[in-house]
Image: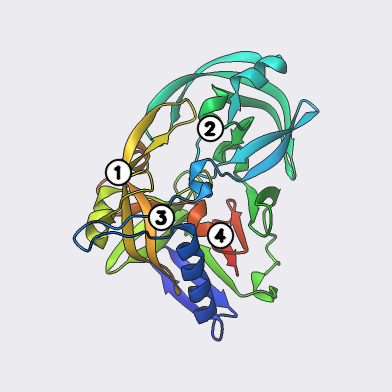
Amino acid sequence: MMRDAAAGSVVMTGFSSRRAALHRRALLAAAFAMIPTCAFAQDAPTIQTPDRLRGGRLSTPVFINGRGPFDFAVDSAANASVIAQDLAESLSLAPAGPIAMHTLIAREVVETVRAPTVRSGALQSADVRFALAPRMGLNGADGLIGSDLLAGHRLVLNFRGVALATISHSRREGDSFLSARRPTARFQTPTDERLNGLLMIDVRSRTARAKAIIDTGAEVTIVNTAFARAAGASPITLRDGSRSQRVSSPTGLSVDAAAVMLPNLHLAGIGLEQVPALAGDFHTFEVWGLADRPAALLGVDVLGLFETAIIDLKRGELVLEL
């Protein structure tokens, strides 16, 4: 099936007989990820917080100056790649002065270092500038690879078994996902709607339509207040009894985000029900001009409902495989 969408063309194969199966699988996965506990009817529902929301991340092996591999998270929505301060020191990377880095929370000025060579899969870059961050702010990772290095590449997220990310070459013009053996959904962002190389798709909750940036660095989907309000999102209580959760930047700067439940979330012909999210008017939405209209950062919690997610940043494509 093929149809047009406001954020670009959407093509789906294998869904005519199996779309319902995908819908059921998504609902089942969501039910096990966040299991409701007893709550009075007049109170907000209580949910369990899955391990993925407490530090789970997709990582890829990275070699720096021929040394490694080091464990780097992949963050398709980060505008700068980051390295842990202690690792930079152990590699004797040369200081490269301060830069302004736009994080989820704020514009932060951070110190940087330069690495002569960086390699991970098809990614091979020279004279790479890394922002410095404490390892604690990176959830224990050695660093993160951002869109500055991922640009022009294809990111393959494999959620079968142990979650793993690999960086490969962009799809060639003659290649087609239509030959895929698995049921597949493909989204494409028009060139004039790409935000500095980020991949953005259309989503909907009830009648509220929103722009969603694909964010592999977000463990849970994040929405702005405009989207939460328009979708009729309801507050929820986390397992620890709170109704908010701290979200942090790589530097360790953190703020509270409201825990909410979206009644549903639709990506083209794919429907998810009762989708937990964190809500707030974060700096990143302002940076991308989305502060005053419904918007979201689509995180690994949603992408992980599929067997594989393929993000081609050069072509502006997202492919989801069941």
| Contact (Cβ within 8 Å) of mark 4 with mark 3 | no
Between disc 1 and disc 3, whose residue precedes?
3
| Contact (Cβ within 8 Å) of mark 2 with mark 4 | no
Give the position of the C terminus as an image quadrant. bottom right
**Residue placed under numbered mark 1 in the picture:** 280
Residue 217 rendering spot, x and y as whole percentages: 52, 43
Q: Amino acid at mark 1?
A: Gly
Q: Amino acid at mark 3?
A: Ala
Q: Residue furthest left?
A: 42
Query: Whole-Å distance between the Cαs marked 2 and 4?
Result: 21 Å
Query: Whole-Å distance between the Cαs marked 1 and 4?
Result: 27 Å
Q: Residues within 10 Å of mark 4 (few under 14, many from 20)?
A: many
Between disc 2 and disc 3, whose residue precedes?
2
Query: Whole-Å distance between the Cαs marked 1 and 2?
Result: 22 Å
Query: Whole-Å distance between the Cαs marked 4 and 3?
Result: 13 Å
Q: Residues within 10 Å of mark 2 (few under 14, many from 20)?
A: many
**Residue placed under numbered mark 2 in the picture:** 80
Q: Residues within 10 Å of mark 3 (few under 14, many from 20)?
A: many
- Dot 3: element: strand
Residue shown at 55%/75% (left/top)? 12
Q: Amino acid at mark 2?
A: Ala
- Per the rendering, the mark at residue 212 is 3
Query: Whole-Å distance between the Cαs marked 1 and 3?
Result: 14 Å
**Left or right: 12 as drawn, with respect to 123:** left
Between disc 1 and disc 4, whose residue precedes?
1
In the picture, residue 62 is in which quadrant? Answer: top right
- Per the rendering, the mark at residue 317 is 4
In the picture, residue 253 is in which quadrant? Answer: top left
Residue shown at 58%/56% (left/top)? 315
Q: Is residue 282 visible?
A: no
- Dot 1: element: loop
Q: How is the image coloured?
A: rainbow
